[in-house]
């Protein structure tokens, strides 16, 4: 294939990644078959990630990437034509032209990017249990708490909702006879005990783990307005994909929180996006840096779900690229799903390192011209062994290439540059102010104070008048499971009916339902809603 110049380096069908004896191209139509970028610290993984992200963005594919050290932020600023960059570009036949890419910064703590929030309901008991490092018994009690919340219309949005719910399911110690009957939370406690023995000691342990999580700053992650994932999947005015960067330097101080958060995002994409089949290019590419943290000490149930998400999410048009130091960091069942590979240098100072090098070499399709295991240890900074899918989805023979230079800046941006980008962000103001809506905490307070609706109301204790009456009727039919810890299904339908009547009178327009369950119920009333294994709700 001809040496690429600056006009043909990237096309509508493929991305130019690097060049050795052969040119390394990443085919866009096969980019959703996932990938792996590996190598020791300081060998060039971040630059390879930036080159791939730039290529996807040029092709109109939105990108999400976690930025552990801050180096990836430079993609938002115009690159510099430094001597070593010009030299490398010249050796590849590239006419280097500095460029920059539309970038949105996100930050769980809301300090260096837009806040990222989810509701407790969205996170779900499985991921929350991993985040809290709970054992099987404690995870079982957490599942009971979620079930009780669903059946009693108690919406779980933030940490105080979960704390209040856990307090509510604890057995009322020592209360008997009339005292027990006067307990306003007796129906909830009884419902919880109906699922098994919920002990005060176990609930206390979960509460202490929640405190640890809060001390790590996770309380800022739970709340509203919750993240709308469609905000990741946008293009700019030039048709280029937006680059979404999660500022993760502080988040990485809590590795379990970091990995669980990214897994939650993947599960949300998996559950929300429709089937797309084979597309000319992905809808979104997701880079998961420090991917080994996802698999460390993960229980089998979680590993099964990770494998399922990775295997099936490609049919939704999402490509997932794991970035870690060594292929052996990734379990074999997941590794088998990663068809596009970039391997930077590994060092073999110990017997374990030597085994790791041999294992990495075996993951590639052999090339008779290369001793793959030996070359892995000889690669210079910026060099890599690559193998991308081609044709019918078969991997190419492994090739030794020099990775092309990025056209954006290499290295971090300044605080002033970040502030300027934040001020012109397309989502400025949407997530910056937290909203504390009425939820389980307030509902339980009212119930204790004697102002709440009876526990057997079908509308989840929300709203009177027409909305409450219609919600009660429809809620009886469809139940009260909530997607975002907001309205029950009955309330959503009742709200829509009420709005429709009101709009005919006043000529208004129905408000955008966003990510609410009601957004699709108008045409699919009666479709069952079931809590997904990783937290959200699967529509079936």
Image (cartoon, helix red, strand yellow):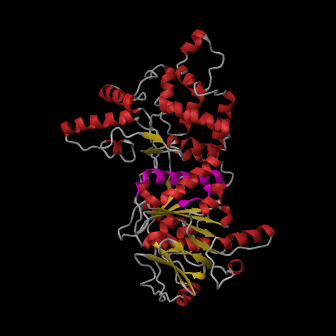
Q: Is residue 244 left or right of residue 180?
A: left
Secondary structure predominantly adopted by residues drawn in magenta = helix
**Quick check: can you spot residue 428?**
no
Residue 503 painted magenta: no
Name the one closer to the observer, 99 or 40: 40
Residue 77: x %, y % from top left: 49, 72
Q: Is residue 459 above or below residue 271?
A: above
Residue 476: x %, y % from top left: 38, 28
In terms of image quadrants, where is residue 387? bottom right
Q: Report the span colored magenta.
A: 246-275
Classify the position of the C terminus by image quarter.
Answer: top left
Residue 402: x %, y % from top left: 59, 82
Q: Is residue 341 above or below residue 516?
A: below
Name the one closer to the observer, 232 or 390: 390
Q: Is residue 372 left or right of residue 417?
A: right
Residue 118: x %, y % from top left: 50, 46
């Amino acid at each position: 294939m001809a040496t690429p110049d600056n006009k043909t380096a990237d096309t509508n069908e493929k991305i130019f990644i690097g060049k050795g004896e052969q040119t390394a191209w990443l085919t866009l139509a096969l980019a959703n078959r996932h990938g792996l970028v590996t190598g020791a610290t300081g060998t060039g993984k971040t630059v390879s990630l930036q080159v791939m992200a730039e290529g996807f963005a040029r092709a109109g594919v939105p990108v999400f990437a976690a930025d552990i050290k801050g180096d990836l932020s430079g993609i938002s600023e115009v690159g510099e034509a430094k001597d070593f960059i010009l030299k490398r570009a010249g050796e590849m036949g590239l006419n280097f032209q500095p460029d920059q890419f539309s970038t949105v910064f996100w930050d769980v703590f809301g300090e260096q990017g837009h806040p990222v929030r989810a509701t407790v309901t969205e996170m779900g008991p499985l991921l929350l249990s991993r985040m809290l490092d709970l054992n099987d018994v404690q995870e079982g009690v957490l599942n009971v708490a979620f079930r009780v919340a669903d059946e009693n219309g108690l919406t779980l949005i933030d940490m105080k909702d979960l704390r209040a719910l856990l307090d509510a399911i604890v057995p009322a110690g020592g209360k008997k006879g009339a005292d027990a009957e006067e307990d306003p939370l007796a129906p909830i406690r009884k419902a919880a005990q109906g699922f098994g023995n919920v002990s005060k000691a176990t609930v206390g342990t979960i509460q202490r783990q929640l405190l640890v999580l809060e001390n790590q700053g996770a309380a800022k992650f739970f709340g509203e307005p919750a993240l709308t994932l469609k905000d990741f999947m946008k293009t700019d005015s030039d048709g280029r994909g937006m680059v979404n960067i999660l500022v993760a330097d502080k988040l990485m101080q809590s590795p379990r929180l970091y990995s669980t958060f990214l897994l939650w995002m993947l599960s949300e994409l998996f559950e929300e996006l429709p089937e797309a089949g084979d597309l000319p290019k992905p809808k979104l590419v997701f880079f998961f840096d420090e991917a080994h943290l996802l698999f460390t000490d993960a229980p089998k149930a979680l590993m099964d779900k990770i494998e399922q998400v990775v295997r099936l999410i490609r049919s939704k048009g999402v490509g997932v690229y794991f970035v870690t130091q060594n292929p052996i960091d990734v379990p074999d069942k997941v590794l088998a799903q990663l068809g596009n590979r970039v391997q930077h240098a590994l060092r073999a100072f110990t017997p374990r390192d030597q085994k790791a090098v041999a294992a990495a070499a075996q993951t590639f399709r052999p090339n008779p011209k290369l001793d793959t295991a030996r070359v892995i240890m000889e690669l210079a900074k910026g060099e890599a062994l690559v193998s991308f899918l081609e044709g019918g989805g078969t991997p190419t023979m492994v090739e030794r290439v020099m990775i092309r230079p990025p056209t954006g800046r290499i290295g971090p941006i300044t605080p002033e540059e970040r502030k300027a980008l934040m001020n012109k962000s397309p989502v400025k103001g949407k997530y910056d102010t937290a909203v504390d809506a009425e939820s389980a905490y307030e509902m339980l307070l009212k119930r204790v104070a004697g102002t709440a609706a009876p526990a057997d109301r079908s509308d989840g204790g929300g709203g009177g008048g027409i909305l409450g009456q219609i919600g009660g009727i429809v809620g009886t039919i469809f139940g009260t499971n909530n997607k975002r810890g907001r309205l029950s299904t009955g309330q959503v339908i009742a709200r829509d009916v009420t709005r429709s009547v009101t709009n005919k009178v006043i000529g208004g327009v129905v408000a955008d339902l966003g990510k609410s369950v009601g957004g699709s119920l108008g045409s699919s009333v009666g479709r069952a809603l079931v809590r997904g294994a990783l937290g959200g709700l699967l529509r079936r």
